[in-house]
Image (tube, rainbow, N blue to C red):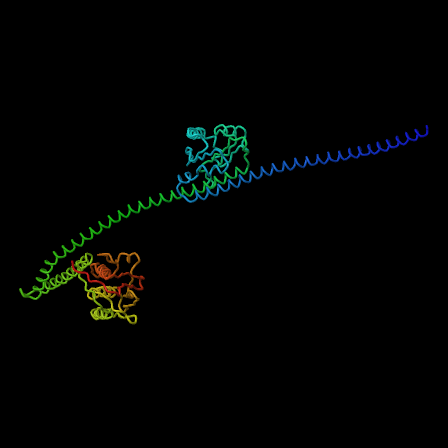
Amino acid sequence: MHNFYGLLLFVIFGMLALFFGRYFRNVKNLKASLVQVSKSFQELDAQAKLILQTDLELNKTQEALDKRLNGLDALHKISRLISTTLIEDEIFHRLNQPFLIELGFEKFLILTFQNNGPFTVRVDFGFPRNEVAPLGKTFNSKPQILQPVKQGKIISSLSAPKDIKDIFTGILSVRQFIATPILSQKNVLGIILAGNQSESYTMTEGDEEVIAILADQIGHSLANARLFEQVFRSSQELERKVQDRTKELTSALEEVKRISKTKSDFISAVSHELRTPLTSIKGYASILITGKVGAVPDKVRERLEKINKHTDNLVGLINNLLDISRIESGRVEMKFLEHDIPSIIANVQDLLTPQLRDKNIQFTTAFDDALPNVFMDAGQIERVFINLINNAIKFTPISGTITAKVTHDSRKVTVGIADTGIGIKEEDIKKLFTEFYRVENEINQNVKGTGLGLALVKKIVEAHGGQIWVTSTVSVGTCFYFTLPTGPKTSTPEA
């Protein structure tokens, strides 16, 4: 019996031992699993914290990026607006509040100045209306505050020393600020002041860049506007001077016309008054020379012939003066008909043959083929040829050559009378066609003349719508050129 109970107890204790052994092994395994789970939770917690921190940083970066993009978009809009005007006041008018708010600042103040003069507030928002004027006075009364910015330096709450930072934050009533110069070709035209009062706002270097870009855009627009204003004022001043000068010239021209008319009227009147006594003098001299009033001694006859000759010269002078006066005033009736120039030259050559023969001068011609007829007053143009060829004979030495050349194009005929004479100095050429002007040379000293021939020639050529000029080389020769239009011209009626 005792063996039975002992065996039973042994079995029970064995079963208990087996149970508790398994129990403690399970507990140990559970503890190990608990440690592993705890370690995994710690790792997950660390990763969650890292993810949260990364997410916060990404959100912060995204906010900064969004802010930067908004600022750049606002800058683009502002640039497009202010770059399309050249009026300074309009530039600041277009810098309105919505665009500036998009830059991310609560307060804005834009000041300008010229030639180191006082500051002028051009743009403001975020400030109470009653504080804007005092702000301008503050900066003008304490120019040293903005002196570094006027010298081209950017000041902001990111980098400014505490004392400078306190000054700006106190004046502007902000926690963070930026003060940026408005530059144009290294000249400071103004200053931008931007700031924020919000504690949640964090200023970055990107904000400085945005305001610097805005300042650069405003600087370029201001420079263009001021340059345009300067050019516009210069243009107005030039226009005013031109108008004044035009009035002066018009007045002077009217005075010249008045004087010219007075001169012409005077010449005409005096010439007419001189003609009558000259006619009488010539008439009486001619009667005396014929001996109709008695015998005339040879010495007296010689002097009467001189009187007659000089009277003819005076009559010629008066006629030339009258012709010049009449042509100038339009009182000469010119009959414009078709004529060929070679025949006129042939007539003049025939008329002046004795003078040509006396000096053994060879007269030659050179004409273009198919020369057109020219509408002209043949009598007046013949006078032109007589004067020019006579001059050529006068200044061409014995056995010289005179050539009449005629060329043409679709609009005009060009005539040249060239000689192998003594030539004309450059300084005398400019005065040749002036009334009463005579070149000082040996020939003119020995041969009398009026100095009206070339002046008359010029008036006749210009009355035909042509031009006249001369080229010359001393000791080589001279060539007078003049043109005549080939088209018809209406006759000028006598006044």
Specify the farthest residue to the left.
Answer: 293
Q: Assign the C terminus to one quadrant of the image.
A: bottom left
The part of the image, by quadrant, that contains residue 434 is bottom left
Residue 114 appears at what percent x and percent y? 41, 36
Residue 404 appears at what percent x and percent y? 27, 68
Q: Assign the N terminus to one quadrant of the image.
A: top right
The part of the image, by quadrant, that contains residue 306 is bottom left
Q: How many marks?
A: 0
Residue 379 appears at what percent x and percent y? 19, 66
- Look at 28% across and 47% down and name the residue there: 245
Q: Foreground residue, 107 or 112?
A: 107
Examine the rendered structure and indicate whether residue 280 appears above or below residue 146.
below
- Look at 40% across and 40% down and name the residue there: 90
The part of the image, by quadrant, that contains residue 479 is bottom left
Q: Foreground residue, 184 or 451?
A: 184
Residue 13 appears at what percent x and percent y? 88, 30
Q: Foreground residue, 439 or 181?
A: 181
